[in-house]
Image (cartoon, helix red, strand yellow):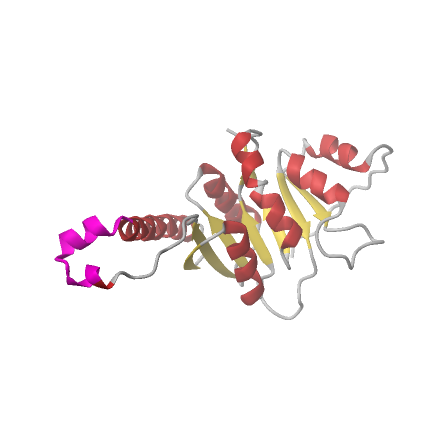
Amino acid sequence: GESIVAQRLFLFGPPARTILDLSTGYDLTVVGAHDRYESTLPGLGHIATCIVEQSTNATLVGREIPPGRGLRVLACIDGSLASQNALRFMASSLQLDSSEVTLLHIAETPWIHPGPVPEWTEYPSREFEAADPEGQIDRELRRESSHILEVARLMLESYGIAAQVLASEGDAVLEIVSESESGEYDLIVIGATGEEGLREALTGHASSRIAAVAPCSVLIPRYVA
């Protein structure tokens, strides 16, 4: 295998700010979820949280990986430039030859689905569609989800990486964390932007929320337009 050459740096100052300043010259910043004194606690420590939320490059929050098996990777995509960038970073930076990769797309559905209306079943198909606007939206979301997953699958295929595809709907953070737990994944890959604005504030920085509650390591390649 290839040898790894590491440098040792001893710096003084506020840990998070010092790491962020230094990381601008690197492609990837690797942090633990907590420092060595709090390593058994859930969530993220203060320093890791600052780095995940403020770093301008890719960040890996490392958690323990069970030995004796290939890496199980859950790559979360939404069709955005940030998620495309995350896939390219993952494919070009990680050795995934013996890994199992799953592409996950979440169709976020904030509305509450009503129960079926029996009378609709007697309508001709066109009248039924006109009377069922939420059903039309659901079908369109499924078509969009299939398209996004297929584009992503083909992108990874161009790197020689085979991937399974999985679609779900609901709250993105909850669905991703739930799938990572039930599927016993070792790594979640999710893109993020370098933008700070109202949308990021309202969503609560989804990538950092996932990094905080995920049961496994989380890789966050950051896309800056």
Given residues 161 and 60, the one toward you in this image is 60
Q: Position of residue 72 (x, y in %)?
A: 55, 62
Instruction: Residue at 65% x, 57% y: name it.
Output: 1
Quarter occupied by residue 11: top right
Viewed as shown, does residue 133 lie left or right of 185?
left
Instruction: Residue at 60% x, 50% y: name it.
Output: 210
Given residues 28 and 147, the one toward you in this image is 147
Q: Position of residue 164 (x, y in %)?
A: 42, 61
Instruction: Residue at 30% x, 50% y: name it.
Output: 134
Query: Is residue 130 shown in magenta?
Result: yes
Residue 170, compared with residue 89, is above or below; it is: below
The furthest residue to the left: 124
Given residues 146 and 120, the one toward you in this image is 120
Tally the marks: 0
The furthest residue to the bottom: 68
Magenta span covers which residues?
119-133
Residue 9, compared with residue 167, is above or below; it is: above
Viewed as shown, does residue 192 lie left or right of 5?
left
Prevailing SS of the magenta stretch = helix
Q: Position of residue 176 (x, y in %)?
A: 53, 55
- Tell me if I can see residue 89 in this picture: yes
Query: Is residue 131 shown in magenta?
Result: yes
Instruction: Residue at 69% x, 46% y: name it.
Output: 30
- Tell me if I can see residue 160 in this picture: no
Q: Position of residue 207 (x, y in %)?
A: 58, 45
Given residues 121 and 85, the one toward you in this image is 121
